[in-house]
């Protein structure tokens, strides 16, 4: 286990290092001058820009800049966001918990839902219910994240104004609400983004759950369970399901990149001010410090999540530790 | 496909094709994709208007679907149906190009890692694992927005460059599985070069999983391109990709619903057809014989 842990930790370190380095290389390869873009206003003379370059260390040799960049990332010194007019670190510190809330809820719901759907499908593999569910899930799987979000937005926030279209709280009423009213207001703002992300993630998860279940069905212990008189359904729930749970933990880690990408689009459509929205908006406002930091932080968060999932899978299943 | 030896028989492609075509998912997928391809090829004949022409230059307005414009017009008064038909070309060209490139690259890297073994393998696969755990869209966003906007060719290269990781894992697993089999050892003993080993023995064996991964990969690339276009950093205007059309109407999606609905349906139909065909192919190649990586890999590429 210790060996496995060390290897897996090394892997996470490589990811973070690679992402940080690639980001640095990309920033420096990109055409255009970050200072010129940020200070592209009349009245800003070349002398001021030069002073800024010195201040930000952009006149130093590339190697020195790289080392400093690594140090800055390690200490969370991520620069200054031009569009928010605040340090990037503060902007991210505010946005990250919101994304974790959104993605976390969707993660839990879609696992519950995906597992149930997978079980229902495996109940009679290739039966009519399995086939239709499979088609419906494949359709869901084929939808662009932002498109489903836009459709949901139009249907349930505009055509049928059941739920708020954007934000995390009502911009006007929230301050005047009671404590329970505030809670309900927050919940109502969560429904559409979490619901959409859940649907999208469920499609991927239940497909995997079904095949994980089908994979353990032809095992010897499954035959034994049936031979000793258990009904198929009972054997499925008591034996197959437990064995299919092990790949589920690994699957949880594999879901994270998709979840992060999904929440980027969902946040953009529903104006949910988390990591995804600030990253997406940083593209339009050319706020490069914020954009790179957003990409960096999301990637590192995903790498950490995957690490946790892998370690959990190894703790649950000794076979993983050995290989 | 490891133990069966059916690839040694001359008639295997036909037998396999027969098995695939018996699956309704494959038939539906192939027919839809054929229709989409025809739309792309004959777009100039099918499109009622010039996709870039601003038809009512006096009142630049978006009009709802009508007889003259079955899918309405966009805020620049361009015909959506014509733009959608031409968009088919962009989606297909980018999808096919990116996947063909990433597939070849993935096969080369995977086979190299598998045949070389040792530290080459260890380093390559560590890097691939690292790359697989980063959401692909984030890398694309970073590169494209730093370079402002990109043309179709750079975008295709970029999608290919970020899409080969899963394939290389798959090919490596398959290569490892056959590396020590007798026919490979014999070929090596007879003096086969690594290149010959790769072409004669590894390639035929990885073809099936690679084909599955390619079909699913095209679906994925179409979705990614649409996503980038929606964020405003897809193919450079005035070229119209499906995602671009949606983006043109996204700000006022409630009023201009036709700009979201129709291109979205085009994306879903195409992607669904690719996915259905991919699923059918995977089942035809017998899932139990595929390396475990296949299922994981197709899942991981989806980000």
Image (cartoon, rainbow, N blue to C red):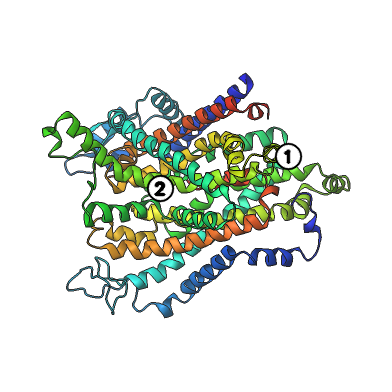
The answer to whether dots 2 and 1 both sit on one chain is: no
Q: Chain of mark 2?
A: A
Residue A30 visible? The answer is no
| Label 2 packing within 10 angstroms: few (<14), some (14-19), many (20+) | many
Q: Chain of mark 1?
A: B
- Tell me how far mark 2 sits from mark 1, CA to CA: 43 Å
Residue B34 to residue A95: above or below? below
Residue A213 to residue A56: above or below? below
**Left or right of A211 in this view: A201:** left
**Left or right of A42 in this view: A312:** right
Badge 1 element: helix
Q: Which residue is mark 1?
A: B116
Q: Which residue is mark 2?
A: A199
Residue A58 is marked as: none
- Pinpoint residue B75: horizontal percent, then vertical percent: 24, 65
Residue B195 to residue A183: above or below? below
């Amino acid at each position: 286990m210790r060996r496995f842990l060390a290897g897996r930790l090394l892997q996470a370190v490589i990811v973070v290092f690679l992402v940080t380095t690639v980001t640095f290389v990309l920033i420096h390869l990109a055409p255009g001058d970050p200072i010129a873009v940020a200070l592209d206003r009349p009245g800003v003379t070349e002398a001021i820009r030069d002073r800024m370059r010195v201040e930000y260390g952009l006149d130093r040799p590339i190697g020195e800049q790289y080392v400093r960049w690594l140090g800055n990332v390690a200490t969370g010194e991520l620069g200054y966001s031009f569009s928010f007019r605040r340090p990037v670190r503060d902007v991210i510190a505010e946005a990250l918990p919101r994304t974790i809330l959104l993605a976390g809820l969707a993660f839990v719901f879609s696992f519950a839902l995906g597992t149930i759907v997978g079980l229902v499908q495996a109940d009679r593999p290739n039966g009519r219910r399995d086939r239709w569910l499979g088609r419906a899930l494949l359709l869901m799987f084929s939808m662009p994240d932002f498109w489903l979000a836009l459709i949901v937005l139009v249907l349930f926030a505009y055509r049928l104004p059941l739920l708020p279209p954007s934000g995390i709280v009502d911009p006007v009423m929230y301050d005047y609400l009671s404590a329970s009213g505030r809670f309900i207001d927050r919940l109502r703002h969560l429904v559409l983004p979490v619901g959409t992300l859940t649907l999208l993630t469920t499609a991927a998860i239940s497909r995997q759950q079904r095949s994980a279940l089908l994979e353990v069905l032809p095992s010897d212990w499954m035959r034994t369970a049936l031979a000793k008189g258990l009904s198929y359904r009972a054997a499925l729930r008591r034996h197959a399901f437990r064995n299919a749970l092990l790949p589920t933990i690994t699957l949880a880690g594999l879901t994270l990149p998709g979840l992060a990408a999904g929440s980027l689009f969902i946040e953009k459509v529903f104006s949910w001010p988390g990591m995804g929205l600030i990253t997406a908006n940083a593209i339009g406002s050319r706020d490069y410090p914020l954009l790179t930091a957003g990409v960096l932080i999301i990637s590192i968060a995903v790498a950490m999540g995957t690490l946790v999932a892998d370690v959990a899978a190894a703790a649950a299943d000794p076979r993983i530790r050995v290989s | 496909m490891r133990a069966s030896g059916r690839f040694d028989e001359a008639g295997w492609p036909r037998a396999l094709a027969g098995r695939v075509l018996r699956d309704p998912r494959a038939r539906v997928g192939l027919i839809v994709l054929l229709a989409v391809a025809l739309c792309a090829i004959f777009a100039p004949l099918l499109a009622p208007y010039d996709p870039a022409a601003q038809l009512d230059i006096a009142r630049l307005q978006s009009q709802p679907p009508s007889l003259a414009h079955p899918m309405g017009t966009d805020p620049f008064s361009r015909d959506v149906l014509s733009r959608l038909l031409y968009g088919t070309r962009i989606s297909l060209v980018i999808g096919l190009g990116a996947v063909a490139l990433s597939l070849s690259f993935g096969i080369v890297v995977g086979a190299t890692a598998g045949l070389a073994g040792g530290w080459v393998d260890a380093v390559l696969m560590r890097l691939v694992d690292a790359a697989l755990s980063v959401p692909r869209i984030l890398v694309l966003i970073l590169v494209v927005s730093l370079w402002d906007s990109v043309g179709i060719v750079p975008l295709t290269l970029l999608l290919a460059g970020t899409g080969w990781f899963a394939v290389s894992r798959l090919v490596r697993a398959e290569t490892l599985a056959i590396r020590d089999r007798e026919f490979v050892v014999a070929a090596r003993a007879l003096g086969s070069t690594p290149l010959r080993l790769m072409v004669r023995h590894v390639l035929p064996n990885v073809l099936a999983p690679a084909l599955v991964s390619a079909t699913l990969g095209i679906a994925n690339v179409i979705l990614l391109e649409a996503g980038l276009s929606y964020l405003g950093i897809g193919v450079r205007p005035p070229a119209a990709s499906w995602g671009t059309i949606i983006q043109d109407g996204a700000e006022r999606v409630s009023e201009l619903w036709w700009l979201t609905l129709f291109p979205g349906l085009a994306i879903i139909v195409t992607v669904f057809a690719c996915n259905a065909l991919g699923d059918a192919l995977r089942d035809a190649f017998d899932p139990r014989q595929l390396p475990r990586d296949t299922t994981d890999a197709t899942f991981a590429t989806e980000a």
